[in-house]
Each structure stands twice: as structure tokens, then as C-alpha cells.
Amino acid sequence: MKRIIGIIGGEGKMGRWLNAFFSGIGCSVLSADRKTALTPDDLARRCDVLVLSVPIDAAVQMARSIGPLLCSSQLLTDVCSLKHEIVAAMRKSTLAEVVGMHPLFGPGLESVKGQNVVLCPVKSSDGFLWLKNVFETQGAMVTVTDPETHDRMMGIVQGLSHWITITIAETVQKSVGSPNQLERFATPVFRLQLGLIGRLLHQDPALYEMLIARNPYVKEMVEAFQRTGADVLKDFIDFEEGCQRLGRLKKFFGELLDPVTQRTDQFLDRSPVDDKGHEQRSRSLEEAIRT
């Protein structure tokens, strides 16, 4: 059954992506944003599925205002990067079916094939099963979990990983006269790290405030990382201890190692860019780090 989808925040980057995605599978899509003729109330009256595609504070407020307008046959969902607060707000505010949704990719993708999507349903329902089937049919890898587990995993996947990237960027700034100089010494692996720094610094800083400061699990992960870092450094002073640690890690990651290595090989095995591309990338990186 094709459903009418309403996207609140539909003119933003992710909102436009959602519009294209649901339109592409044959759904009718309506959008409400600051400058649209349609309002969130209009969407509540006309749509089967309401998607909150706005920052988390606005999403919580919108859930509380729009939730009471929805009935039990409708589905209310969101695309926030943290789930505990928004799922609780949606659940408490409406009789509609509620599913927290987190597409683990940005709006630049043309296809969800092979991409991860996490769903946090309040309970199994027709709307949840429909949404899950939509993504699975398009080739996405759907994981169903609760909001707390989701946020704890995001403490590692987003919070800790972005904290590490920011910390590396700060260390580079304090240790190297110019990013151009560092680029000239970069290995293929470190070029990937520079790419992560560049991607992070081109994003809205408010995004990282939310992913790092607002996730209650990030502090725990960062503190564990700092303690472990000191232990790793101590072990590698003793070569034998360091090798044993790497052996334990190889056993822990097990079958995951081959596919992730193959995915990175396609980037690492590329030939270096020509001098013009090298210089352009260096200037862009230097500008990003200095900003």
C-alpha cells in the first residue's frame, strides 16, 4: 500500500532527500517548512506518515505540538541522530504509532543499497513493519533496537569517532606549521584521516555539539579511550606486549576484518592525484583547519 508521506522540515537537505526517496517508491509526498504553503497541521490532517526532519530540539517541540492531532492509524517518526529524548517525546504526545528512525548516512546518497538504517519502534505495528519493509526492499540493512542501545552505540560510532577526529585536527594545528607540509608526508592511510578532518570541518559545528555533548554515553566512551590509550602506549614500549594486544584485537574483530579491509583497499590502492589536484586539496584542507 502506497502511503501519503508528510515531511516536516522538508526543505532542508535531509528533508529533500526523504522527499526524493519516498517519491521514488511511488508514495505521494507533502512538505511543510518555514516558507511552504502547507503547515505541520495540514500534514497531520492529510498524511499517513509524518516524518520530523528537523534538529532534535525542534523535533521534540514539534512532536509535542503535532502529536495530539494524530490518530492511531497514522505513523509518527523522525530522523534525529539521538533517539532516547525524541522517542520519549513522540510516545508521550500521541496516539499514533511511533518509530524512531536513524538513517546512518547523509543526504548526498542516491541509493540506500548497503546502507544502515536503525529503527526504534515503541512496539511492533503495521506502520513499523511497513517502514522496515520499505528500506529493506530498497536494499538497506535495517537494525531494530531500543533508543538506549541506539544512543550507546552512537556514543562510539558518532560521538567518540568525531571526538578523535577533532582531537587529531587540534594536534595537527599545534604540531605542524602548515597542513600543506603534512600533506607532503602523508601515507594513503593518513590521507583518509585528512579526508575525515576535511569532512568534519565542512559541517555545521552545531551538529557535533549535539553528537558529542548531548549524548550521555560519549563522556564514558572518551574516558575509556583515554585510559586505553595510556595502556596501549605502555604496551608498545614493550614490543612483545604490543604484539599480544594486536593479536587479541584481531581475534575480537574476527570475520569483520576481511570485508572492511576490502572496502578501504579501494581507496588506499588508488594512484596519487596529480600535482594540481594535490595543491587544490592542500589549500582546501589548510583553509578548513584555520577557519
Image (cartoon, rainbow, N blue to C red):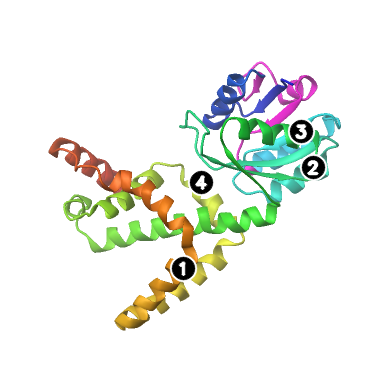
Outermost residue toward the left?
275
Tag 4–tag 1 contact (CB < 8 Å): no
Whole-angstrom CA distance, mark 4 to mark 1, is 38 Å
Distance of mark 4 from mark 2, alpha carbons?
33 Å
Marks 2 and 3, how far apart at CA: 8 Å
Please tell me which of labels 4 and 3 falls first in the chain: 3
| Residue 97 position (above or below residue 251) | above
Regarding mark 2 in the picture, which secondary structure is present there? loop
Which residue is nearer to you in this view: 196 or 289? 196
Residue position marked by numbered label 3 in the rendering:
127
Q: Is residue 117 visible?
A: yes
Q: What is the three-letter code of the residue carrying label 2?
A: Ser
Q: Upstream in the sequence, badge 1 or badge 2?
A: 2
Residue shown at the point (23%, 52%) measured from the top left: 179
The image quadrant that residue 73 belongs to is top right
Q: What residue type is labelled 3?
A: Gly
**Disc 4 from disc 3: Cα separation:** 32 Å
> What span is colored magenta in the figure?
28-56
Q: Which of marks 4 and 2 is in front?
A: 2
User: Who's the residue at 21% across and 54% down the image?
Assistant: 186
Residue placed under numbered mark 1 in the picture: 251
Secondary element type, mark 4? helix
Residue for badge 2 = 124
Front of the two marks 3 and 1:
1
Tell whether 241 sits left or right of 149.
Answer: left
| Residue 64 located left or right of residue 269 | right
Percent x, y of residue 104: 54, 43
Q: Residue at x 76, y 48 (%)?
A: 88
* Distance Cα–Cα, label 3 vs label 1: 40 Å
